[in-house]
Amino acid sequence: MTNESRPGCAALTRPTSVLDRMARRVLHALDREPRATVGWLSETLGIARGTVQARLGALFETDVLRPPSTTARPASLGYSLRAYVTAAVAQSEFDNAMRALRHIPEVIECVAVAGTDDLVLQVVARDADDLYRIGQLVLRCPGIRRTATSLVLQELIPYRMAQLLV
């Protein structure tokens, strides 16, 4: 069964094409000036406004760009703790586990991994008691056999992409 045919895995599909030079230039300019207007981008990059608008539209429509809400830091929303939770999943319950995990708002990311465990979740919590509560919710998801939690102490290299645009 492919990821595209699994009901719980629609989010695992990837963009089908690699960004061309112009799209990379637009993204790099947006890194420098996140609130840039189409006019500013057009003038700065030396490309037509219509081209800038079409490129921006294509970047959002093809899921190349993540929604703007994903750039908010969890602490600014009241979630001062962040942790990574590894989980082993009974494969016969995989889709049910994914559906249940999607209903836990504090699970902000979930990736499938190869190795001892099946999933790595990134979760956020308000405090230690909240993290415990979230851990219990994860364990109650159908098919989750066991978990292990690692608390993030400090972000040493923030999530970044700019260095790959060159």
Image (spheres, rainbow, N blue to C red):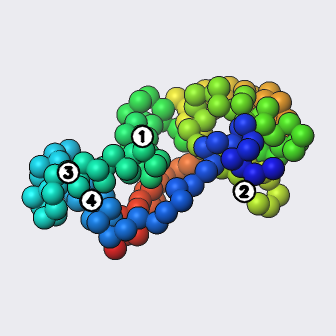
* Circles 3, 1 touching at the beta carbon (< 8 Å): no
Residue at 65% x, 26% y: name it.
Answer: 103
Residue 87 image offset from top left, x and y in percent: 77, 45
Callout 2: SS: loop
| Residue for badge 1 | 67
Q: Disc 3 vs disc 2: which is toward the camera?
A: 3
Q: Amino acid at mark 2?
A: Val
Residue 95 found in image quarter: top right
Is 145 left or right of 86, judged from the image as shown? right
Residue 81 image offset from top left, x and y in percent: 53, 38
Residue 15 image offset from top left, x and y in percent: 52, 56
Is 86 left or right of 44, judged from the image as shown? right
* Circles 4, 2 touching at the beta carbon (< 8 Å): no
**Mark with earlier residue (1, 2):** 1
Q: Disc 4 vs disc 1: which is toward the camera?
A: 4
Q: Amino acid at mark 1?
A: Pro
As measured in the structure, the alpha-carbon distance from the residue carrying label 3 to the one carrying label 4 is 13 Å
Callout 1: SS: loop
| Residue for badge 2 | 113
Q: Amino acid at mark 3?
A: Gly
| Residue for badge 3 | 50
Q: Amino acid at mark 4?
A: Val
| Disc sitting over residue 156 in the figure | none
**Mark with earlier residue (4, 2):** 4
As measured in the structure, the alpha-carbon distance from the residue carrying label 4 to the one carrying label 1 is 17 Å
In the picture, the quarter occupied by the C terminus is bottom left
| Residue for badge 4 | 26
Q: Is residue 109 above or below residue 160?
A: above
Callout 3: SS: helix
Density class for disc 1 (Cα within 10 Å; few <14, some 14-19, many ≥20) is few
